[in-house]
Amino acid sequence: MAGVLFALLFATALVLIRLALPKGEEPGAQWLQTGSTNLKIAATIMPFAGIAFLWFMGVVRDGLGRYEDKFFSTVFVGSGLLFLAMMFVAAGVGAGLERSRAVGDPDVATFGQMVLLTVSKTYALRMAAVFMISLATIWLKTGLMPRWLVAVSYLAAVGLLVASDITMWLVLAFPVWVLVVSLLLLARAGVIDIDRDD
């Protein structure tokens, strides 16, 4: 359930941040006026999404059991923690700018906007891609998850690595992927039945 909670909270925070920073707008302080409420809500949601993500990582790692590969597990945990830390930084920059009333200084607001976008789109998303690749490699080696999920994980990760700077909406691929993995884990545990025909 932690992965489902993360996916919902994180996707909500991402959409709010994206709506606060409309694409095509001139850099400046206007986004702090129009997106103030969105940034407040996103900054409030992000820590809870982070807590859920840590639990999700724990559940996934525990599920590996004796099949855990130390090399790929180190990359899996490290990239997951780096992703989370960078998303916290991005949310913190947005919240800090909104609360500091940087709207009066367009240069500070523009700098904050560029930091927020660079940290979230360029760095955090690429760590999310590494997280996906390392986990998909473990699944490929162990057969613990279906091959189609391994293939989707690799494809989505390559998309995040290559195209994360193109559009901020691409960040939603990661919470969707976590949601799919979580639903498969819940189905495997017998909590939900995703094979029903009704």
Image (cartoon, rainbow, N blue to C red):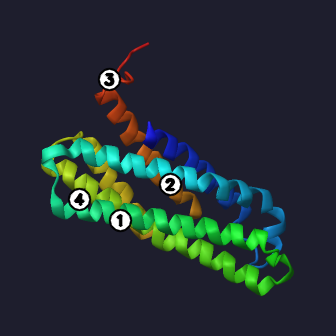
Residue receiving disc 4: 73
Q: Residue at x 13, y 46 (%)?
A: 66
| Image coordinates for residue 95, horizontal then vertical, percent | 70, 66
Q: Earlier in the sequence, mark 3 or mark 2?
A: 2
Q: Residue 79, labelled with which disc?
A: 1
Q: Earlier in the sequence, mark 1 or mark 4?
A: 4
Residue receiving disc 2: 50
| Image coordinates for residue 20, horizontal then vertical, percent | 73, 62
The reply to whether dot 1 and dot 2 touch (C-beta < 8 Å) is no
Q: Earlier in the sequence, mark 4 or mark 2?
A: 2
Mark whose residue sits in front, 3 or 2: 2
Q: Three-letter amino acid code at disc 3? A: Gly
What element does badge 3 sit on? loop
The reply to whether dot 3 and dot 1 touch (C-beta < 8 Å) is no
Q: Residue furthest bottom?
A: 107
Residue receiving disc 3: 190
Q: Three-letter amino acid code at disc 1? A: Ser
Q: Residue at x 30, y 28 (%)?
A: 189
Q: Is residue 86 left or right of residue 137?
A: right
The one nearer the camera, 96 or 198, is 96
Q: Residue furthest right?
A: 104
Q: Earlier in the sequence, mark 1 or mark 2?
A: 2
The one nearer the camera, 161 or 143, is 143
